[in-house]
């Protein structure tokens, strides 16, 4: 098994996913990240995930596609996905692709976690 590209911990029923990479561009890494997050989703009857982008500077379109897939998977299990601490340049891409209308985006992780309360 390759090293994880994520730091994952759970607190009060909310899974906090943090990227370790600054650039999420490589197809193989995106697939691995997707699998790791899918395991978190599948491990919970009603997954509540916050994905923290504080370390991320660059994101490929394949990574955006993966987020859309993960959001659908979370919703199909009656859960929720929140994104937090997104770099303004990446946020702009989310706006252009209308991903900001599909997934709730918050300034801080704490703010995102509170939306599940």
Image (spheres, rainbow, N blue to C red):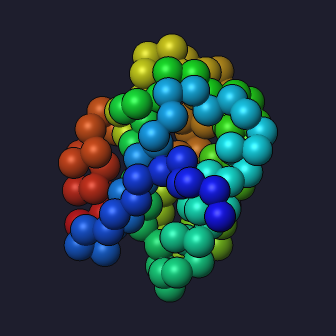
What x and y, as percent, mark residue 75?
Answer: 59, 67
Q: In which quadrant of the rendered image does the C terminus lie?
A: bottom left
Decide if residue 51 is on the left or right side of residue 101.
left
What x and y, as percent, mark residue 27?
Answer: 78, 39
- The vertical placement of 72 against 87, above or below, is below
What x and y, as percent, mark residue 98?
Answer: 64, 31
- The vertical placement of 89 against 83, above or below, is above
Can you tell which quarter of the image residue 52 is in?
Answer: top left
Q: Residue at x 51, y 34 (%)?
A: 21
Q: Residue at x 61, y 32 (%)?
A: 24
Q: Residue at x 54, y 54 (%)?
A: 4
Whether residue 51 is visible here, answered yes or no, is no
Q: Nearer the viewer, residue 112 or 23?
A: 23
Whether residue 109 is visible here, answered yes or no, is yes
What x and y, as percent, mark residue 86?
Answer: 42, 29
Q: In which quadrant of the rendered image does the N terminus lie?
A: bottom right
Q: Residue at x 50, y 27 (%)?
A: 22
- The vertical placement of 15 against 55, above or below, is below
Decide if residue 48 is on the left or right side of residue 112.
right
């Amino acid at each position: 098994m390759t090293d994880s590209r994520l730091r994952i911990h759970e607190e009060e029923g909310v899974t906090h996913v943090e990227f370790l990479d600054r650039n999420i561009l490589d197809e193989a890494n995106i697939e691995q990240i997707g699998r790791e997050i899918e395991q978190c989703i599948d491990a919970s009857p009603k997954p509540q995930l916050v994905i923290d982008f504080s370390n991320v500077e660059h994101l490929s379109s394949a990574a955006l596609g993966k987020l859309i897939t993960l959001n659908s998977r979370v919703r199909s299990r009656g859960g929720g996905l929140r994104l937090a601490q997104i770099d303004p340049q990446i946020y702009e891409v989310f706006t252009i692709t209308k991903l900001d209308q599909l997934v709730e985006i918050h300034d801080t992780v704490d703010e995102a976690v509170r939306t599940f309360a």
